[in-house]
Image (cartoon, rainbow, N blue to C red):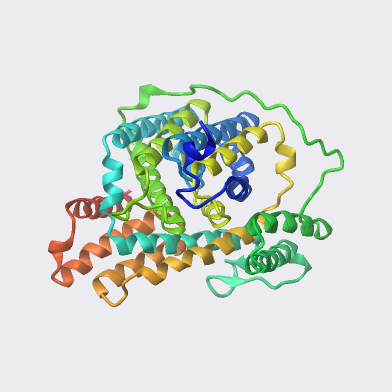
Amino acid sequence: MSLEKCFKLKERNTTVNREIVGGVTTFLAMSYILALNPQILSAAGMRWGGIFTATAVSSALATLFMALVANLPVALAPGLGLNAFFTYTVVLGMKCSPAFALTAVLLEGALFILLSVFGIREAIIKSIPVNLRKAVAVGIGLFITLIGLNNAGLIDGSAATPLAFVTLDMSHATAIVALLGLVVTTALYILKVPGSILLGIVITTIIGIPFGVTSIPESFKPFSAPETPILFNFEFKSVLTLKFFAVFFTFLFTDLFDTIGTLLGVAEQANLKDKQGNVMNAKGALLSDAVGTVVGACLGTSTVTSFVESSSGVAAGARTGLASVVTALLFLVSLFLSPLFALVPSAATAPALVFVGFLMMRSVMGIDFKDSSEGIPAFITIMAMPFAYSISQGISFGIISYVLCKIFAKKAKDIPLVTWILALVFLANIIFEASK
């Protein structure tokens, strides 16, 4: 079967070259997870090398599944936040074993497979009002902008104000390199240079060498053999405990709405929607996420989820699963070339994230702010994601405020049943978290 027939390139107005550039861009934008996930999970007493292998393999398999089942340019990997919850809350805070946490991840993924097969997760996506979907895209844009600024070292949370830009001197070389990279990326984009975001990452990496930001070890060897991960490390004897349920529910809730938010944001940005305005192949995409989580747990890593950095690949031209195939292959290659990929500093990928934030802001023009019952929940969604540093919390506050605003506007009949249910679930979760 040809690439055209398999991925419908012409139908989505893209080319093989664009998909390759998009896939590489997405990989470079999210490749930091290969270093960060092992760093976080190894603090729970797990082997760094085994986690690195588990991270790369689970990311590759889940992303490849996304490509072939959903035909979407969305990449997956162990999610940030979820891995921190795994280590610092469950293992170190609650004194549970890594096997306990991995069991919760496994069963969460298994339940998600069932919910995806029966279309329940898809129904949840469809229940989110149109204006809120657009707001999710904008909120994610601001969220990843904040991630980019933080990765670049451009913002400082210890200043007199809650948030401030750092002073651009040589003590903040990473910030200077990232700012130069943003200028380069902006110039390339305005000049309509193909692959401007990917080129920006490469050029910024080179710029970082004289600044000491891009570090090349003296005994640099690009090749290394991968370590064997710890397979099927589970602890089923604790499944029926209250503690297990609390951990299981947190993984379940956060993963569900982080994934939904990412899919909505990417679909809005790439216009990958059907005639009803719903995400194309949403069922396949959600199933890919669930399968990835189960595979990741079996390999010994925390919850695998759709990555918001996929937006950078979409911005570079990706529109089909072919880009995801490229990203998946690069994850497999990284198993043997980890020192080479480790050369790309956060200062080089940060400008890409900030720039994609600008591109995702376009969706704000489609939000109906004239209708307060639509505009206020949209604003709350946009505001909450970067300030709460959470996609799922942004959706949570957005849905609750949507129901309240519709009630205040005497338009309760416009609220779909599933949206009512979601609002109650979100509210119950807030009460549950506050009572812990």
Q: Quadrant of residue 157?
A: bottom right
Q: Is residue 279 above or below residue 381?
A: above
Residue 149 is situated, as x and y percent measured from the top left of the image, at 60, 63
Q: Residue furthest bottom?
A: 370
Residue 280 is situated, as x and y percent measured from the top left of the image, at 37, 47
Q: Residue at x 53, y 67 (%)?
A: 358
**Residue 303 visible within the image:** no
Q: Nearer the viewer, residue 188 or 380?
A: 188
**Residue 215 visible within the image:** yes
Q: Nearer the viewer, residue 113 or 243?
A: 113
Q: Residue furthest right?
A: 218
Q: Residue at x 51, y 40 (%)?
A: 4
User: How many dots with numbers?
Assistant: 0
Q: Quadrant of residue 173?
A: bottom right
Residue 314 is situated, as x and y percent measured from the top left of the image, at 53, 53
Residue 22 is situated, as x and y percent measured from the top left of the image, at 58, 49
Q: Residue at x 65, y 61 (%)?
A: 152
